Image: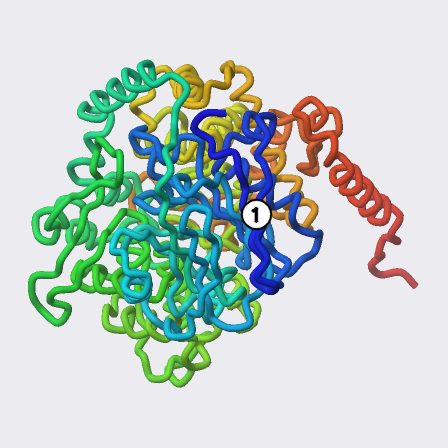
Amino acid sequence: MFSYAGKILHVNLTTGETRTELLSETMAKQYIGGIGLGIRLLMDNSKPGTDPFHPDNPIIYCTGPLSGTMGPTAGNGYAVVSKSPATGGVGEAKAHGFFGPDLKRAGYDAVVITGKAPKLSYLWIDDDKVEIRNGEYLKNATVGDTDNKIRDELGDFYIRVSAIGEAGEKLCRFAAIINDEFRAIGRTGMGAVMGSKNLKAVAVRGTKDVNVANMPGFKEYIKMIHERMKGPATKKYKTLGTPENVLVLNSLSALATRNWTNATFEGANKVSGEYLNEHYVKKIVGCATCGMRCDHICVVPEGPYKGSTSRLEFECLWSLGPLCGVDRLDAVIEAMRITNEYGMDGISIGVVVAFAMDLYEHGIITKEQTDGIDLKFGNAEALIAIIHKIGKREGWLGNILAEGVAKAAELIGGDAYKYACHIKGLELPGYDLRTLKTAALGFSVSFRGACHLRNGAYSPDVKGKVNRFKIEKGRGKMITDESHMYNIIDSLIVCKFSRGTYYDGWKDLTNYYTLATGIPITVEEMTADGDRIENLARLFNIREGKGTRKFDDVPYKIKNFPVPDEGPAKGVCVSDEEMAIGLDDYYASRGWTADGIPTVERLKLLGLGDLAYIAEDAMKTAQANKDAKASAPVATVGGN
């Protein structure tokens, strides 16, 4: 095979043993790479019911078939997959930058890490040389310091490092893994899994060539993509970047504010992409092989946070700004800077803080429990203070909030659950699902929990392609088709910001794949790959007790707190009846049962027959529950 390294590295941190296995062409073609290959390796290398923090839970680094090539955006990515400590189901995230290419050039399509090191350690991959090294001197170090210290120790500035911070070491359930200073394997708590293994970092130096099958054709293809990247398809990312979304969503009453209390933010202009670029953006940089450049690096020019520097995307700006009622960009930049240093997900951290602010405003937690922090919406200083406590698991509240909103609500008790905005345990991203109802359905069925990047279901709502205030038949098919494309994008590890440059969609992606790998693949085969990956992820979640209909839902607040803002969205929320219509339609479009379980026939058609027993067991359980409910005695009222 061309482009693929053809090898999977296995590392046992407990015993120190390493071994390699070959990647077959069949596995490569069916799962592509990235999250597809990662989820299959997770299924094959884990046992049902394994705790995410148990040494037997593997954490899997995966490259894509285009990683390490000259391919724009696709040449620079990697993915990390494991069982999520946030959701108990599939955990996965991707990052771009410079780490992914070096991992491929070291000679590996994937690295499967199991066990637990006896002390804090880091994994050093130097082409064929693999070593578990002492990392005790890195304890509680920030991600940036860890990067620099490892490079100093190994004597090579160009070594690439993927590391956790203090939050990961202390098992914050939304801890991230950071590479290249600002690039995050952000969602689903992959950093906490690393921390549970006493694994501070993975450092890599790769010097091998990554050869493509058709170099002349590949060169012409990527020249074409580079030219498209100079055009209107990527204008948003090269100019204002994703913070452009602030005013767009605010105008649609879809900018979740003060923990989904409001759908518009009165301070939106102060935290807009326009204001950010005029006053704080100092440079725009790009990843290896990228023809676009989208990294907006922000620096605070004056005030209490003078000199604070961070990359700032919409999701993080929103979660630390409008969602917390904060309209000060200097504080948002500082909050993002320390979030990166502790190694936490920039989306989840804001949702967690907003949740705590909501509880504080409603008297569910007190000032004594916050250690004196006045945790009101809009208090920028409180935002900074509580992030430090969460990153260190300091104090009663800091320790509880590090569990994420779902588990924190359980621990706090009472009405706390009403303010915990998550799906399957993963905190919601930056869209008000009350006014974007295709998104509500799409987020609810995402296999990794609340996620805007598993099927792009917000897009038809925001672009006005559908009536965004209702869920109706047809939305399920829309979400299904887009999820297949998104699964392939994340398995090729093509940056989603570049998806508009693939004018011919599936044809472009299949051509890209075949030019690089030499493996012929049709549009129908690649579409089936996307479908296979979705069903595989669903099966893993079902196996872990997290994958049936009852888990495909939206938060209490989305269903029970109507939008109070004046305008066309006033009074809107999502009803159980609408969700039922949407889920029935979605499951039908997938060929699943009404309980959201893939049928055996569907699994066999997709080449997943070896895993059909998971679905069969789930169907038997679902039927037994229905029978028990039907035979239960009916309670009567009154009588003599």
Badge 1: how crowded within 10 Å, few (<14), some, or many (20+)?
many
Asked if residue 514 shows in the view, the reply is yes
Q: Horizontally, is 545 left or right of 102 in the view?
A: right
Q: Nearer the viewer, residue 78 or 376?
A: 78
Percent position (x, y) of residue 374?
30, 77
Q: Horizontally, is 617 left or right of 197 in the view?
A: right
Q: Nearer the viewer, residue 541 or 464?
A: 541
Q: Horizontally, is 293 left or right of 174 in the view?
A: left
Establish if 482 lies above or below 449.
Answer: above
What residue is shown with label 1? 90
Colour scheme shown = rainbow
Which residue shows up at 66% across the image and 37% down it? 596
Residue furthest right in the image: 640
Residue furthest front in the image: 129
Percent position (x, y) of residue 617?
79, 42
Asked if residue 438 shows in the view, the reply is no
What's the residue type where badge 1 is placed?
Val
Q: Which image quarter holds the C terminus? A: bottom right
Which residue shows up at 41% across the image and 19% down it? 213
Percent position (x, y) of residue 15?
61, 63
* Element class at badge 1: strand
Establish if 10 lies above or below 637.
Answer: above
Percent position (x, y) of residue 212?
39, 24
Establish if 490 lies above or below 344.
Answer: above
Q: Total number of numbered labels?
A: 1
Which residue shows up at 84% across the image and 61% down it? 638
Q: Nearer the viewer, residue 38 or 571?
A: 38
Which residue shows up at 38% across the image and 38% down it? 208
Establish if 111 lies above or below 603.
Answer: below
Q: Horizontally, is 531 left or right of 557 in the view?
A: right
